[in-house]
Amino acid sequence: MKGHYLVSGGWAHLLRIMCVAIAVGMMLGAASCRRVDRTLGPWGWERLERPTDTLMLRLQDAFLGDTPLDSCVMLVERFHDYADRSDAPAIERARATFWDARLAFATENYDEARDLFRKSLAATDSARYPFDAKYTRLCLEPLEGRVLDGGNLDWKWYEEMIDDLDYALANDAPVYGGLRAQYLCCIMTYSGNPSRALQYALLADSLFACSGRRADRLTNRLNVASTRVLVGDTVGALRDYAWIQREIESGVRPMSPLMLPLIDYNRWVEARDTAALLRLRDVTRHDPALAGYKALAAAWLADIELESGRTDSISTYLADMKQGADYTDDAAQRSFVLKMLGRGYEAMGDHRQAIESLKASADIAEENVRMLSTDKYAMAETRRITDDIERQRIADRRSARIWMWVYTSVIAALLIIAAIFLMRYLKRLHRGRQMERRDLEEARRSELSMSLSVCEKERQIEELRQKISALADEEMIDAGAAREIESSLRTSAAASKADEEFGRVFATVSPNFNQRLRQLYPRIGRNAMRMAEYIAIGMDNRHIARVMNIRPESVKQNRWRLRQALGLGADDNLDATLRDLL
């Protein structure tokens, strides 16, 4: 009972320790957890508490991974089954249009995708569902040829984009990760970190390459070339322009019609590639949508012709520059077009137009210089913000690792405590079984001793019978003595049965003893076997002699024979050796 109490008490103590540790772990976890919001994680869509919530997550995973297009179409159709009902909320219908746009984008129908994204954005209540509006705008901007407005950058949105990029890299979503890396490249370019911008652009290029999105990779390679120019790698930028040109010639459709003119213009600016400039002139000559690039090509060709002292085509160049000057988005480029417009009018003798154009060019250049000086402070501020965000992210990750180690340590401590108490329990259980085994052996030995006592009494009666027989031989007893002799014979038979009973009891106590002893001593006799049994249960020489009705010296002699037969040395213990055979 005492051992059982100790075991029960140990388990109760272990249970209390485990409960305390689990409670502490839950408190620490609750303290470290952030506020739970109602968004569909890990993305950010607002929950509608409708069946479409589950479809939103499935659609997001499908479009980010390697899900076949047929499966994406089926999911979009199921979404429409709910969104097209009369009782469906307006945001659900806007989301259905959003997924139609994503489907068109996946099939490289970029014009249709652009129109559907615009339709979804117009139907979205941005005040109530800001994430939907931002996400749709984010998907729409590359299709419209625009980049992020760095001056009005939402830094929380920047953090979310980094989180999305980390999720995409960890969950095998290369297309989604490539889009995020593209936008992060634009942000880093604006914030004055061209080296980091190049890293994001190269990451996007590798992600698009492994996912087989050739059109997306084509657009992104233009970002790679631009950032290479910012870090001074002009040769690398020219290699990127050549690669883009080969891809387009091989049949890859660019997402924007402005890509080819932009490549030719950059190749002219960076490497003074005259063939690229003439190609830009031919491509833009009959396309009103490319009036800005046509004006730039005309301005550079006019500059080349005026530097050579000729004015053969100046009138044509003047018309192109005048038509497209207002369509150039960059202030430095517009200033250059107006400057060459003024030089062209001067060469043609129209001094009034020349003065107006040159004055307008000077005003734009002065304003651009002023803006650039202001942008230095803006770039420094954005760089500081991005660095602060990066440091905070590193601190958050370090904190997450610390909490992970805390939880791991608590679990490991619980396991160690459980192992210790389990070992103690098993040890106590083993000790209890050993005690039970010893008690059983003592009981069996007591039973054997009692059996031997009976045998000894029977042998004493046998001695008395022999004495009476001797008296009868000398005719010193009568018939009554003869009856006593018969009684002694019966007693002897009973003693023989008692000896057999001892053998049966001993065989029950140790059923393998005789077999093991015969393996060591094959020629052992019956009396020697019986003596070995007596020695094994702990009887001394005097007791054995009395039971076996022999002299103590005979017992010693038989013990010596047993030692020799078992091959025991002078330091070996015969009693211990025989007990080990029990």
Image: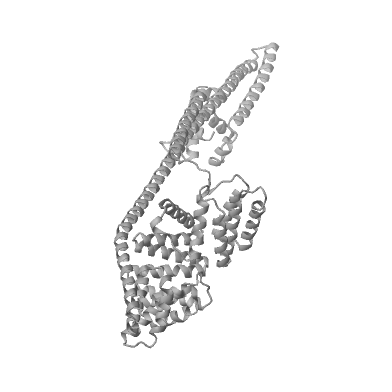
Where residue 426 sits in the image (x, y, percent)? 50, 33
Q: Is residue 127 left or right of residue 303?
A: right
The quarter holding residue 515 reads: top right
The quarter holding residue 420 reads: top left
Q: Is residue 462 left or right of residue 348?
A: right
Q: Nearer the viewer, residue 506 or 301?
A: 301
Report the colour scheme.
Answer: one colour
Residue extending farthest front: 352
Where residue 360 sits in the image (x, y, percent)? 34, 71
Residue 576, placed above or below residue 68: above
Q: Is residue 346 left or right of residue 493?
A: left
Residue 449, placed above or below residue 309: above
Residue 91, placed above or below residue 195: above
Q: Nearer the viewer, residue 470 or 295?
A: 295
Where residue 559 sits in the image (x, y, percent)? 49, 32
User: Is residue 30 in sight in this rendering?
Assistant: yes
Q: Nearer the viewer, residue 287 or 442?
A: 287
Q: Nearer the viewer, residue 217 or 494?
A: 217
The C terminus sits in image quarter: top right
